[in-house]
Image (tube, rainbow, N blue to C red):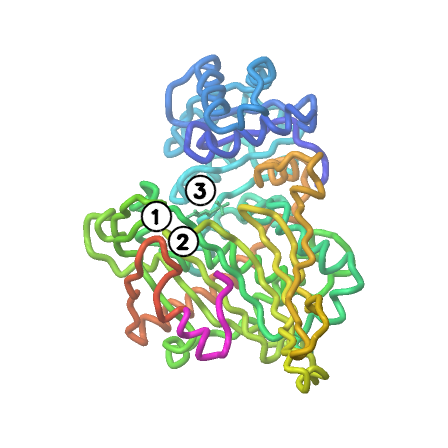
Amino acid sequence: MSEKASTLLLFGATGDLSRRMLLPSLYGLYADKLLPEDVSIIGTARSELSDEEFRETAIEALRARLPADFYNEITARKFAARLSYLPVDATTPEGYDELAAKIHIDKGVAIFLSTAPSLFTTVIENLERVGLAGPSVRLALEKPIGTDLPSSQKINDAVAAAFPEERIFRLDHYLGKETVQNVLALRFANSLLEPVWNAGHIDHVQISVAEEVGLEGRAGYYDDAGASRDMLQNHMLQLLALVAMEPPADYDPEAVRAEKVKVLKALRPILPADAPDNVILGQYGEGEMKGEAMRAYADELGEKSDTETFIALRAHVDNWRWSGVPFYLRHGKRLATRKTEILIQFKCVPHSIFSNVNAVPQPNELIISIQPTENIRLKLMTKTPGLDRGGMGLREVPLDVTLDGAFSDYRRRIAYERLLLDLIEGDPTLFVRRDEIEAQWTYIDRLRASWMEAGMTPEIYEAGGWGPKSSAERMKKDGRQWND
Ligand code: BG6
Protein backbone atom coordinates (compact mmCIF):
# COMPACT_ATOMS: atom_id res chain seq x y z
CA MET A 1 0.00 0.00 0.00
CA SER A 2 2.95 2.34 -0.02
CA GLU A 3 3.08 2.58 -3.82
CA LYS A 4 2.83 6.09 -5.13
CA ALA A 5 -0.37 7.15 -6.79
CA SER A 6 0.03 8.60 -10.25
CA THR A 7 -3.38 10.30 -10.26
CA LEU A 8 -4.80 12.56 -7.62
CA LEU A 9 -8.51 13.00 -8.08
CA LEU A 10 -10.07 15.92 -6.25
CA PHE A 11 -13.82 15.89 -5.69
CA GLY A 12 -15.06 19.38 -4.82
CA ALA A 13 -12.18 20.89 -6.78
CA THR A 14 -13.83 24.29 -7.18
CA GLY A 15 -14.82 24.53 -3.52
CA ASP A 16 -13.45 26.61 -0.70
CA LEU A 17 -11.09 23.96 0.76
CA SER A 18 -9.62 23.26 -2.63
CA ARG A 19 -9.00 26.92 -3.40
CA ARG A 20 -7.70 27.91 0.05
CA MET A 21 -5.73 24.80 0.98
CA LEU A 22 -5.47 21.93 -1.49
CA LEU A 23 -4.36 23.71 -4.67
CA PRO A 24 -1.92 26.03 -2.80
CA SER A 25 -0.50 22.98 -0.99
CA LEU A 26 -0.05 21.07 -4.22
CA TYR A 27 1.63 24.12 -5.73
CA GLY A 28 3.98 24.19 -2.70
CA LEU A 29 4.91 20.55 -3.27
CA TYR A 30 5.37 21.15 -6.97
CA ALA A 31 7.52 24.25 -6.46
CA ASP A 32 9.73 22.32 -4.03
CA LYS A 33 9.98 19.41 -6.50
CA LEU A 34 8.25 17.07 -4.08
CA LEU A 35 5.26 16.28 -6.22
CA PRO A 36 6.25 13.09 -8.06
CA GLU A 37 6.95 13.82 -11.72
CA ASP A 38 4.28 11.49 -13.04
CA VAL A 39 1.39 12.62 -10.82
CA SER A 40 -1.47 14.22 -12.67
CA ILE A 41 -4.20 16.05 -10.80
CA ILE A 42 -7.77 15.78 -11.97
CA GLY A 43 -10.33 18.13 -10.52
CA THR A 44 -14.01 17.42 -10.56
CA ALA A 45 -17.02 19.39 -9.38
CA ARG A 46 -20.43 20.28 -10.65
CA SER A 47 -19.42 23.46 -12.54
CA GLU A 48 -19.08 23.10 -16.29
CA LEU A 49 -15.48 24.13 -16.80
CA SER A 50 -12.94 23.26 -19.45
CA ASP A 51 -9.41 22.20 -18.47
CA GLU A 52 -8.21 25.68 -19.34
CA GLU A 53 -10.90 27.41 -17.27
CA PHE A 54 -10.11 25.21 -14.28
CA ARG A 55 -6.40 25.99 -14.62
CA GLU A 56 -7.17 29.71 -14.64
CA THR A 57 -9.38 29.38 -11.51
CA ALA A 58 -6.55 27.47 -9.84
CA ILE A 59 -3.98 30.13 -10.72
CA GLU A 60 -6.28 32.83 -9.34
CA ALA A 61 -6.62 30.83 -6.12
CA LEU A 62 -2.85 30.47 -5.83
CA ARG A 63 -2.30 34.18 -6.34
CA ALA A 64 -4.87 34.99 -3.67
CA ARG A 65 -3.61 32.52 -1.08
CA LEU A 66 0.14 32.25 -1.40
CA PRO A 67 2.65 34.74 0.02
CA ALA A 68 3.88 37.05 -2.73
CA ASP A 69 7.50 35.98 -2.17
CA PHE A 70 6.61 32.33 -2.75
CA TYR A 71 4.18 32.64 -5.64
CA ASN A 72 5.81 32.60 -9.04
CA GLU A 73 3.73 33.06 -12.17
CA ILE A 74 5.92 30.83 -14.36
CA THR A 75 5.97 28.02 -11.77
CA ALA A 76 2.21 28.43 -11.28
CA ARG A 77 1.59 28.02 -15.02
CA LYS A 78 3.81 24.93 -15.17
CA PHE A 79 2.00 23.52 -12.15
CA ALA A 80 -1.37 24.28 -13.73
CA ALA A 81 -0.34 22.22 -16.76
CA ARG A 82 -0.53 19.19 -14.46
CA LEU A 83 -4.20 19.94 -13.78
CA SER A 84 -7.18 18.80 -15.76
CA TYR A 85 -10.88 18.91 -15.07
CA LEU A 86 -14.02 16.93 -15.66
CA PRO A 87 -17.46 18.14 -14.59
CA VAL A 88 -19.24 15.51 -12.51
CA ASP A 89 -22.44 16.03 -10.60
CA ALA A 90 -21.58 13.81 -7.65
CA THR A 91 -25.26 13.09 -6.97
CA THR A 92 -25.99 11.43 -10.30
CA PRO A 93 -24.35 8.38 -11.92
CA GLU A 94 -23.48 10.35 -15.06
CA GLY A 95 -19.93 11.46 -15.48
CA TYR A 96 -18.29 8.70 -13.44
CA ASP A 97 -17.71 6.45 -16.48
CA GLU A 98 -15.98 9.27 -18.27
CA LEU A 99 -13.91 9.88 -15.16
CA ALA A 100 -12.86 6.24 -14.96
CA ALA A 101 -11.91 6.27 -18.62
CA LYS A 102 -9.60 9.23 -18.02
CA ILE A 103 -7.64 7.49 -15.24
CA HIS A 104 -4.88 4.85 -15.43
CA ILE A 105 -6.25 2.93 -12.51
CA ASP A 106 -3.45 0.35 -12.41
CA LYS A 107 -0.90 3.11 -11.85
CA GLY A 108 -2.35 4.05 -8.47
CA VAL A 109 -5.06 6.58 -7.67
CA ALA A 110 -5.56 8.80 -4.64
CA ILE A 111 -9.05 10.26 -4.34
CA PHE A 112 -9.74 13.22 -2.08
CA LEU A 113 -13.37 13.84 -1.16
CA SER A 114 -13.86 17.42 -0.13
CA THR A 115 -17.55 17.39 -0.91
CA ALA A 116 -20.44 17.71 1.51
CA PRO A 117 -20.44 14.60 3.75
CA SER A 118 -24.04 13.95 2.69
CA LEU A 119 -22.57 13.01 -0.72
CA PHE A 120 -19.93 10.57 0.56
CA THR A 121 -22.09 7.46 0.22
CA THR A 122 -23.34 8.27 -3.30
CA VAL A 123 -19.87 9.15 -4.51
CA ILE A 124 -18.38 5.97 -3.09
CA GLU A 125 -21.10 3.78 -4.61
CA ASN A 126 -20.47 5.35 -7.99
CA LEU A 127 -16.71 5.04 -7.68
CA GLU A 128 -17.11 1.35 -6.96
CA ARG A 129 -19.53 0.92 -9.84
CA VAL A 130 -17.06 2.31 -12.37
CA GLY A 131 -14.12 0.35 -10.96
CA LEU A 132 -12.52 3.25 -9.10
CA ALA A 133 -12.33 1.45 -5.76
CA GLY A 134 -9.90 -1.35 -6.60
CA PRO A 135 -6.72 -2.30 -4.72
CA SER A 136 -4.70 0.49 -6.34
CA VAL A 137 -7.07 3.22 -5.12
CA ARG A 138 -6.95 5.00 -1.78
CA LEU A 139 -9.57 7.40 -0.50
CA ALA A 140 -9.16 10.51 1.66
CA LEU A 141 -12.10 11.99 3.54
CA GLU A 142 -12.36 15.46 5.01
CA LYS A 143 -14.24 16.17 8.20
CA PRO A 144 -16.97 16.23 9.34
CA ILE A 145 -17.25 12.45 9.30
CA GLY A 146 -20.67 12.34 10.85
CA THR A 147 -22.28 14.49 13.48
CA ASP A 148 -22.36 11.81 16.16
CA LEU A 149 -21.34 8.19 16.61
CA PRO A 150 -24.24 6.57 14.68
CA SER A 151 -23.92 8.91 11.69
CA SER A 152 -20.16 8.51 11.67
CA GLN A 153 -20.54 4.72 11.78
CA LYS A 154 -22.93 4.94 8.88
CA ILE A 155 -20.39 6.84 6.79
CA ASN A 156 -17.58 4.54 7.90
CA ASP A 157 -19.66 1.49 6.99
CA ALA A 158 -20.48 2.89 3.56
CA VAL A 159 -16.80 3.61 2.93
CA ALA A 160 -15.77 0.22 4.31
CA ALA A 161 -18.11 -1.51 1.87
CA ALA A 162 -15.85 -0.34 -0.95
CA PHE A 163 -12.47 0.37 0.67
CA PRO A 164 -10.61 -1.61 3.33
CA GLU A 165 -9.42 0.41 6.33
CA GLU A 166 -5.78 0.53 5.16
CA ARG A 167 -6.88 2.40 2.04
CA ILE A 168 -8.99 4.97 3.90
CA PHE A 169 -7.25 8.21 4.84
CA ARG A 170 -9.34 10.32 7.26
CA LEU A 171 -7.97 13.81 7.51
CA ASP A 172 -7.48 15.90 10.58
CA HIS A 173 -5.48 18.84 9.30
CA TYR A 174 -4.03 19.49 12.78
CA LEU A 175 -1.95 16.34 12.32
CA GLY A 176 -0.34 17.95 9.29
CA LYS A 177 0.91 20.87 11.39
CA GLU A 178 4.64 20.77 12.01
CA THR A 179 4.45 21.66 15.71
CA VAL A 180 1.77 19.07 16.32
CA GLN A 181 4.08 16.37 14.95
CA ASN A 182 6.77 17.96 17.06
CA VAL A 183 4.95 16.78 20.19
CA LEU A 184 6.06 13.27 19.24
CA ALA A 185 9.63 14.38 18.56
CA LEU A 186 9.78 16.30 21.80
CA ARG A 187 8.43 13.44 23.85
CA PHE A 188 10.12 10.49 22.22
CA ALA A 189 13.41 11.88 20.87
CA ASN A 190 14.54 13.39 24.18
CA SER A 191 15.43 11.31 27.19
CA LEU A 192 14.91 14.31 29.47
CA LEU A 193 11.15 14.62 29.33
CA GLU A 194 9.70 11.13 29.27
CA PRO A 195 10.70 10.17 32.85
CA VAL A 196 8.72 13.16 34.19
CA TRP A 197 5.82 12.88 31.72
CA ASN A 198 3.32 11.40 34.16
CA ALA A 199 1.09 11.98 37.16
CA GLY A 200 4.07 11.79 39.51
CA HIS A 201 5.50 15.02 38.06
CA ILE A 202 2.78 16.79 36.10
CA ASP A 203 0.18 18.88 37.90
CA HIS A 204 -2.08 19.48 34.93
CA VAL A 205 -2.19 19.97 31.17
CA GLN A 206 -3.88 22.83 29.29
CA ILE A 207 -4.79 22.66 25.63
CA SER A 208 -6.10 25.91 24.22
CA VAL A 209 -7.26 26.63 20.72
CA ALA A 210 -8.31 30.26 20.67
CA GLU A 211 -9.58 31.80 17.46
CA GLU A 212 -10.34 35.38 16.50
CA VAL A 213 -12.68 34.41 13.67
CA GLY A 214 -16.42 34.06 14.11
CA LEU A 215 -18.97 32.36 11.90
CA GLU A 216 -17.11 33.10 8.62
CA GLY A 217 -20.28 32.67 6.60
CA ARG A 218 -20.66 29.04 7.69
CA ALA A 219 -23.87 29.52 9.67
CA GLY A 220 -25.64 26.48 8.21
CA TYR A 221 -22.89 24.08 9.23
CA TYR A 222 -21.66 25.74 12.38
CA ASP A 223 -24.95 26.27 14.15
CA ASP A 224 -25.57 22.51 14.01
CA ALA A 225 -22.02 21.61 14.96
CA GLY A 226 -20.95 24.07 17.65
CA ALA A 227 -17.48 24.17 19.17
CA SER A 228 -17.71 20.66 20.61
CA ARG A 229 -18.26 18.96 17.26
CA ASP A 230 -16.34 21.42 15.09
CA MET A 231 -13.06 21.49 17.03
CA LEU A 232 -13.11 19.47 20.23
CA GLN A 233 -14.22 16.15 18.71
CA ASN A 234 -11.35 16.11 16.23
CA HIS A 235 -8.41 18.52 16.49
CA MET A 236 -8.37 18.95 20.26
CA LEU A 237 -8.84 15.30 21.15
CA GLN A 238 -6.05 14.45 18.71
CA LEU A 239 -3.77 16.94 20.49
CA LEU A 240 -4.71 15.38 23.80
CA ALA A 241 -4.00 11.90 22.48
CA LEU A 242 -0.53 12.93 21.29
CA VAL A 243 0.29 14.45 24.67
CA ALA A 244 -1.02 11.51 26.66
CA MET A 245 -0.15 8.44 24.55
CA GLU A 246 2.39 5.80 25.54
CA PRO A 247 5.52 5.52 23.41
CA PRO A 248 4.79 3.32 20.38
CA ALA A 249 7.45 0.72 19.55
CA ASP A 250 8.25 2.55 16.33
CA TYR A 251 6.99 5.31 14.06
CA ASP A 252 4.67 3.02 12.23
CA PRO A 253 1.08 3.91 11.26
CA GLU A 254 -0.51 1.08 13.22
CA ALA A 255 1.74 1.44 16.27
CA VAL A 256 1.21 5.22 16.56
CA ARG A 257 -2.54 5.05 16.05
CA ALA A 258 -2.98 2.11 18.40
CA GLU A 259 -1.42 4.16 21.21
CA LYS A 260 -3.60 7.18 20.46
CA VAL A 261 -6.77 5.14 20.47
CA LYS A 262 -5.95 3.71 23.90
CA VAL A 263 -5.89 7.25 25.28
CA LEU A 264 -9.15 8.18 23.59
CA LYS A 265 -10.80 5.10 25.04
CA ALA A 266 -9.43 5.90 28.50
CA LEU A 267 -11.08 9.33 28.57
CA ARG A 268 -13.41 9.44 31.55
CA PRO A 269 -16.98 9.96 30.32
CA ILE A 270 -18.52 13.18 31.62
CA LEU A 271 -21.87 12.15 33.09
CA PRO A 272 -24.86 14.48 33.62
CA ALA A 273 -24.03 14.93 37.31
CA ASP A 274 -20.41 15.86 36.41
CA ALA A 275 -21.23 18.27 33.61
CA PRO A 276 -21.94 21.51 35.54
CA ASP A 277 -18.64 21.26 37.38
CA ASN A 278 -16.49 20.12 34.45
CA VAL A 279 -17.89 21.87 31.40
CA ILE A 280 -18.23 25.55 30.53
CA LEU A 281 -20.24 26.55 27.49
CA GLY A 282 -20.20 29.99 25.98
CA GLN A 283 -21.52 31.94 23.03
CA TYR A 284 -20.00 35.20 21.89
CA GLY A 285 -21.98 38.35 22.37
CA GLU A 286 -21.11 41.80 21.07
CA GLY A 287 -17.67 43.17 21.68
CA GLU A 288 -14.71 44.90 20.17
CA MET A 289 -11.66 43.45 18.50
CA LYS A 290 -8.72 45.54 17.31
CA GLY A 291 -10.84 48.66 17.55
CA GLU A 292 -13.65 47.19 15.49
CA ALA A 293 -17.15 46.56 16.84
CA MET A 294 -18.13 42.89 16.67
CA ARG A 295 -21.64 41.55 16.29
CA ALA A 296 -22.98 38.90 18.58
CA TYR A 297 -23.23 35.31 17.29
CA ALA A 298 -27.04 35.38 17.42
CA ASP A 299 -27.03 38.61 15.48
CA GLU A 300 -24.73 37.17 12.76
CA LEU A 301 -26.93 34.10 12.65
CA GLY A 302 -30.12 36.12 12.51
CA GLU A 303 -31.82 34.21 15.31
CA LYS A 304 -31.39 33.03 18.88
CA SER A 305 -29.48 29.82 19.29
CA ASP A 306 -28.14 27.54 22.01
CA THR A 307 -25.05 26.61 20.01
CA GLU A 308 -21.77 26.91 21.90
CA THR A 309 -19.01 28.93 20.26
CA PHE A 310 -16.83 28.32 23.30
CA ILE A 311 -16.21 25.20 25.30
CA ALA A 312 -13.92 24.53 28.21
CA LEU A 313 -13.58 21.15 29.78
CA ARG A 314 -11.85 19.44 32.64
CA ALA A 315 -11.09 15.99 31.24
CA HIS A 316 -9.35 13.00 32.75
CA VAL A 317 -7.48 10.12 31.16
CA ASP A 318 -8.17 7.21 33.44
CA ASN A 319 -5.01 5.18 33.22
CA TRP A 320 -1.89 4.53 35.26
CA ARG A 321 0.19 7.35 33.77
CA TRP A 322 -2.41 10.10 34.12
CA SER A 323 -4.30 9.19 37.27
CA GLY A 324 -5.55 12.39 38.94
CA VAL A 325 -4.08 14.78 36.31
CA PRO A 326 -6.70 17.13 34.89
CA PHE A 327 -6.52 17.98 31.19
CA TYR A 328 -8.11 21.41 30.75
CA LEU A 329 -9.28 21.92 27.19
CA ARG A 330 -10.51 25.23 25.90
CA HIS A 331 -11.62 26.42 22.50
CA GLY A 332 -13.58 29.43 21.39
CA LYS A 333 -14.33 31.72 18.51
CA ARG A 334 -14.00 35.52 18.73
CA LEU A 335 -11.47 35.31 21.52
CA ALA A 336 -8.81 37.93 22.26
CA THR A 337 -6.17 36.47 20.01
CA ARG A 338 -5.43 33.51 17.75
CA LYS A 339 -3.43 31.07 19.75
CA THR A 340 -3.10 27.29 19.85
CA GLU A 341 -0.90 25.91 22.56
CA ILE A 342 -0.30 23.00 24.87
CA LEU A 343 0.87 23.81 28.36
CA ILE A 344 2.33 21.20 30.66
CA GLN A 345 2.43 22.43 34.22
CA PHE A 346 4.83 20.40 36.34
CA LYS A 347 4.45 20.00 40.09
CA CYS A 348 6.23 22.25 42.57
CA VAL A 349 9.50 21.03 44.05
CA PRO A 350 8.66 18.58 46.86
CA HIS A 351 10.38 20.73 49.47
CA SER A 352 11.56 24.31 49.14
CA ILE A 353 14.93 25.04 50.70
CA PHE A 354 14.25 28.74 50.14
CA SER A 355 11.35 29.33 52.52
CA ASN A 356 13.63 30.80 55.19
CA VAL A 357 15.00 33.33 52.68
CA ASN A 358 11.59 34.50 51.50
CA ALA A 359 11.77 32.96 48.07
CA VAL A 360 9.04 30.93 46.46
CA PRO A 361 9.90 28.58 43.59
CA GLN A 362 7.17 28.42 40.94
CA PRO A 363 6.35 25.15 39.21
CA ASN A 364 8.09 24.57 35.88
CA GLU A 365 6.03 24.90 32.74
CA LEU A 366 6.54 23.61 29.24
CA ILE A 367 4.59 25.53 26.63
CA ILE A 368 4.33 24.15 23.12
CA SER A 369 2.99 26.94 20.90
CA ILE A 370 1.46 25.59 17.76
CA GLN A 371 0.19 28.78 16.15
CA PRO A 372 0.50 31.56 15.18
CA THR A 373 4.08 31.29 16.42
CA GLU A 374 5.75 27.92 16.57
CA ASN A 375 7.94 27.58 19.58
CA ILE A 376 8.72 25.50 22.60
CA ARG A 377 9.34 27.22 25.90
CA LEU A 378 10.43 25.69 29.17
CA LYS A 379 10.06 27.98 32.16
CA LEU A 380 12.81 27.45 34.70
CA MET A 381 13.42 29.11 38.07
CA THR A 382 16.65 31.05 38.35
CA LYS A 383 18.14 33.35 40.94
CA THR A 384 17.74 37.06 40.25
CA PRO A 385 21.14 38.76 40.27
CA GLY A 386 22.04 40.64 43.45
CA LEU A 387 23.52 40.33 46.91
CA ASP A 388 20.30 39.03 48.46
CA ARG A 389 20.38 41.26 51.56
CA GLY A 390 16.59 41.22 51.84
CA GLY A 391 16.27 37.52 51.01
CA MET A 392 16.92 35.56 47.88
CA GLY A 393 15.20 36.47 44.65
CA LEU A 394 13.92 33.74 42.35
CA ARG A 395 12.48 34.40 38.94
CA GLU A 396 11.04 32.31 36.14
CA VAL A 397 13.14 32.53 32.98
CA PRO A 398 12.07 30.88 29.74
CA LEU A 399 14.33 28.56 27.82
CA ASP A 400 13.00 29.35 24.41
CA VAL A 401 13.28 27.42 21.18
CA THR A 402 11.71 29.53 18.50
CA LEU A 403 11.27 27.12 15.67
CA ASP A 404 10.97 29.94 13.13
CA GLY A 405 14.42 31.05 14.26
CA ALA A 406 16.01 27.63 14.66
CA PHE A 407 14.72 26.57 11.26
CA SER A 408 14.71 29.89 9.44
CA ASP A 409 16.10 28.12 6.37
CA TYR A 410 12.93 25.99 6.15
CA ARG A 411 9.70 27.18 4.58
CA ARG A 412 6.67 27.03 6.88
CA ARG A 413 4.29 24.78 5.06
CA ILE A 414 0.50 24.54 4.91
CA ALA A 415 -0.61 21.50 6.96
CA TYR A 416 -2.22 19.97 3.87
CA GLU A 417 1.11 19.80 2.01
CA ARG A 418 2.31 17.06 4.31
CA LEU A 419 -1.01 15.26 4.29
CA LEU A 420 -1.46 15.38 0.52
CA LEU A 421 2.05 14.05 -0.04
CA ASP A 422 1.46 11.26 2.48
CA LEU A 423 -1.78 10.44 0.71
CA ILE A 424 -0.07 10.31 -2.69
CA GLU A 425 2.73 8.17 -1.26
CA GLY A 426 0.37 5.99 0.79
CA ASP A 427 1.56 6.69 4.35
CA PRO A 428 -1.42 6.71 6.75
CA THR A 429 0.48 7.53 9.99
CA LEU A 430 -0.94 11.06 10.22
CA PHE A 431 -4.48 10.06 9.27
CA VAL A 432 -7.19 9.07 11.71
CA ARG A 433 -8.19 5.43 11.98
CA ARG A 434 -11.81 4.36 12.31
CA ASP A 435 -11.48 3.27 15.93
CA GLU A 436 -9.98 6.65 16.83
CA ILE A 437 -12.77 8.64 15.25
CA GLU A 438 -15.39 6.43 16.85
CA ALA A 439 -13.78 6.75 20.29
CA GLN A 440 -13.78 10.53 19.76
CA TRP A 441 -17.49 10.54 18.91
CA THR A 442 -18.32 8.28 21.84
CA TYR A 443 -16.75 10.81 24.19
CA ILE A 444 -18.38 13.84 22.54
CA ASP A 445 -21.84 12.26 22.30
CA ARG A 446 -21.74 11.43 26.02
CA LEU A 447 -20.53 14.94 26.82
CA ARG A 448 -23.24 16.67 24.80
CA ALA A 449 -26.00 14.42 26.12
CA SER A 450 -24.80 15.09 29.66
CA TRP A 451 -24.80 18.86 29.42
CA MET A 452 -28.22 18.77 27.79
CA GLU A 453 -29.56 16.47 30.49
CA ALA A 454 -28.08 18.81 33.09
CA GLY A 455 -29.97 21.67 31.39
CA MET A 456 -26.81 23.66 30.59
CA THR A 457 -26.90 26.43 28.00
CA PRO A 458 -24.09 28.70 26.81
CA GLU A 459 -23.13 31.75 28.80
CA ILE A 460 -22.74 34.90 26.70
CA TYR A 461 -19.20 36.29 26.60
CA GLU A 462 -17.86 39.47 25.17
CA ALA A 463 -16.26 39.09 21.74
CA GLY A 464 -12.56 39.89 22.01
CA GLY A 465 -12.13 38.51 25.53
CA TRP A 466 -11.20 35.08 26.89
CA GLY A 467 -14.64 33.52 27.00
CA PRO A 468 -17.23 33.25 29.76
CA LYS A 469 -16.32 34.51 33.22
CA SER A 470 -17.00 31.10 34.67
CA SER A 471 -14.15 29.65 32.60
CA ALA A 472 -11.54 31.61 34.58
CA GLU A 473 -13.51 31.10 37.80
CA ARG A 474 -13.56 27.36 37.28
CA MET A 475 -9.79 27.27 37.01
CA LYS A 476 -9.48 29.48 40.08
CA LYS A 477 -11.58 27.04 42.05
CA ASP A 478 -8.93 24.40 41.23
CA GLY A 479 -6.18 26.82 42.28
CA ARG A 480 -5.03 27.19 38.67
CA GLN A 481 -5.31 29.69 35.84
CA TRP A 482 -5.50 29.67 32.09
CA ASN A 483 -2.44 30.80 30.25
CA ASP A 484 -4.20 33.66 28.39
C1 BG6 B 1 -11.63 23.70 11.14
C2 BG6 B 1 -12.88 24.22 11.78
O1 BG6 B 1 -11.59 22.30 11.19
O2 BG6 B 1 -10.49 24.23 11.79
C3 BG6 B 1 -12.89 25.74 11.79
O3 BG6 B 1 -14.01 23.74 11.07
C4 BG6 B 1 -11.63 26.28 12.42
O4 BG6 B 1 -14.03 26.22 12.49
C5 BG6 B 1 -10.41 25.66 11.77
O5 BG6 B 1 -11.61 27.69 12.26
C6 BG6 B 1 -9.16 26.05 12.49
O6 BG6 B 1 -8.04 25.61 11.80
P1 BG6 B 1 -6.65 26.33 11.95
O7 BG6 B 1 -5.70 25.50 11.18
O8 BG6 B 1 -6.83 27.73 11.39
O9 BG6 B 1 -6.36 26.38 13.42
Q: Is residue 171 visible?
A: no
Residue corresponding to mark 2: 336
Secondary structure category for the residue under label 1: strand
* CB of mark 3 near ligand 1 (< 8 Å): no
Residue at 65% in and 42% down: 404
Q: Amino acid at mark 3?
A: Phe
Precedes in sequence: disc 2 or disc 1: 1
Q: Count the marks: how many?
A: 3
Q: Are marks 3 and 2 in contact (CB under 8 Å)?
A: no
Q: Is residue 14 visible?
A: yes
Q: Amino acid at mark 1?
A: Met
The location of residue 230, given as percent across then percent down, is 42, 53
Precedes in sequence: disc 3 or disc 2: 3
Q: Are marks 2 and 1 in contact (CB under 8 Å)?
A: yes
Q: Residues within 10 Å of mark 3 (few under 14, many from 20)?
A: many
Q: Residues within 10 Å of mark 2 (few under 14, many from 20)?
A: many
Residue corresponding to mark 1: 289
Q: Which mark is residue 229?
A: none
Q: Where 475 sits versus 401, above or below? A: below
The location of residue 354, given as percent across then percent down, is 69, 82
Q: Is residue 79 left or right of residue 147?
A: right
Magenta span contains residue 160: no
Q: Amino acid at mark 2?
A: Ala
* Residue located farthest toward the bottom when viewing the structure as drawn: 356
Q: Is residue 94 left or right of residue 237?
A: left
Identify the image quadrant of the N terminus. top right
Residue corresponding to mark 3: 120
Precedes in sequence: disc 3 or disc 1: 3
Q: Which residues are magenta?
A: 472-484
Residue at 51% in and 68% down: 328
